[in-house]
Image: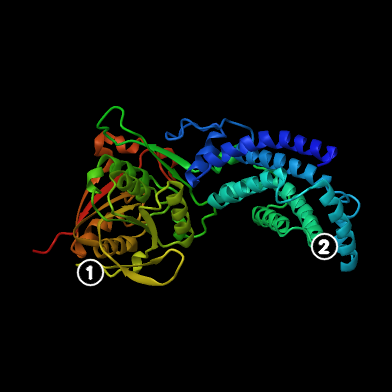
Amino acid sequence: MDVKHSKAVSLSTRIVAPMLEKYSVLEKSLVTPRDIACARARCLGVMSISDWLDVPFVQVSGGLPAILAAVLSEAFQAWERFYQLIPGIRTGVPQLANEESTICKERGAKLESVLQTTRLEFCQSIEVNALQNVLNLLARVSRLDSTLDEEISRAGCQAILSRLIKQIKTCILFVESSGSSEKDFDALMDLQDTACEILYFPGIKGAMAFTDEELLSRLPLIYNMRPASPVKENDDVTTILIHQVTKRQTAQADVGFLIWPSAIVLGRWLLSNRHVLRGKTILEIGAGCGLVGILAATIVKDCNTPEKVVITDVNNTVLENIFRNINLNDLSSVASVAKLDFYRQTGDNYAGKWIAGEFNEENERQRTPVDIVLAADIICQPDDAAAAAKTIYDALNPGGMAYVICANEKHRFGVGMFASECEKVNLTATQANVREMYHGNLLTESMDSAAGFVDDMTLTFFEVAKYKIQ
């Protein structure tokens, strides 16, 4: 190895080493969607996530996207130093793509000779390997968190990646024309493929980076929830992260884009009555963002039982968001998503038989009845009351129970008809004012985050039974 190259390698090692330390911390810390969401919050100064008290992130302007963009920038700077070491890069190689193949081969052979003399190898380069590691990290976190994907793109990564891809194409052309090692070609192709995967985000070109205020608004909602009546003073907090759908609502079917008051209240009721879920199969209907079903799945997971929770809605966008929220809370082992339409159920299946499809398919199939049905704010009009009652009847096993909370008739048309509609399909419904339960404590948890909540809102709790026929 000549003196010039030896010094260059030494310099690159000094440059790459600190960047790799940062990369290592990020690689170990950003493993799951929940890890990523927590890191996004912590980097913006949000400290309210109970299970992320000891994390290697501090508040920084621009948040996690700025940190990731800075690491990419450092890796790219090291790569550029290596790139500039290749003799002829400035004078010949960038123009190779526009020359005849014979000229390419001649120039490539000359450059290959020089490259072999200086012993530069792409596949063994510290800079190339470090850059590949950083690109792999960015690609992985982008796949796990689509919100962060957009934020990374707008944090300055697009310009770096565009420049990098052009340089990689130049190197690939050189390797192809000079007959270099197949390992060098593969290393460059891997770099190019990963960079292209990260670079593509529709509508981002030229967009400004998000402000810290905008980044804060894009964080998932954080619910640190306790039972309404703690058994112990130091009862563990259950932390649930929920992404709402950020698209604009254009129809009644889009109400599931947001968190509604009854979901928070029913979730807290479940934490106060974990025993009703123990050893039971569970279905949430009209789930919206899925808070209730996700809390139920968290309880089931904590109990280490084999039962699963099925979380359903009818809107495809809502179902995609539920799937995202299941992964965001590390619950894919105990929760699944299905597409259930209230208006497709008949209300005459005593043994239990409900119809639903997969969230990404149109085909429906009969499903096994469950022991528990959960529902929050599922009635917006009179016809919904009848359809919801029929759905509950068909979905429940004989002897099963449903727990439903809705805002009262003043706020939701049709809620006043729900109990009578239950009776029509041989369900028994008892009801109570939520404000009179647990000394009103069910209403004190994070209600400000709910859409449409007002201080004088009255919520009704329905306990619905499907009794066995003797």
Q: Amino acid at mark 2?
A: Ser
Q: Which residue is mark 2?
A: 177
Residue 79 located left or right of residue 430: right
Which residue is drawn at the image coordinates 46% and 31% (left, top)?
53
Q: Label for residue 349?
A: 1
Picture coordinates of residue 3, whole percent (x, y): 84, 37
Whether residue 211 can be seen here:
no
Q: How many marks?
A: 2
Residue 102 located left or right of residue 259: right
Q: Secondary structure at mark 1?
A: loop
Q: For residue 13, which quarter of the picture?
A: top right
- Quadrant of the frame with the N terminus: top right
Front of the two marks 1 and 2 = 2
Q: CA distance from mark 1 to mark 2?
A: 71 Å
Which residue is drawn at the image coordinates 47% and 42% (left, top)?
221
**Is the residue 304 above or below the residue 173 in the image?**
above
In the foreground, 226 or 389: 226
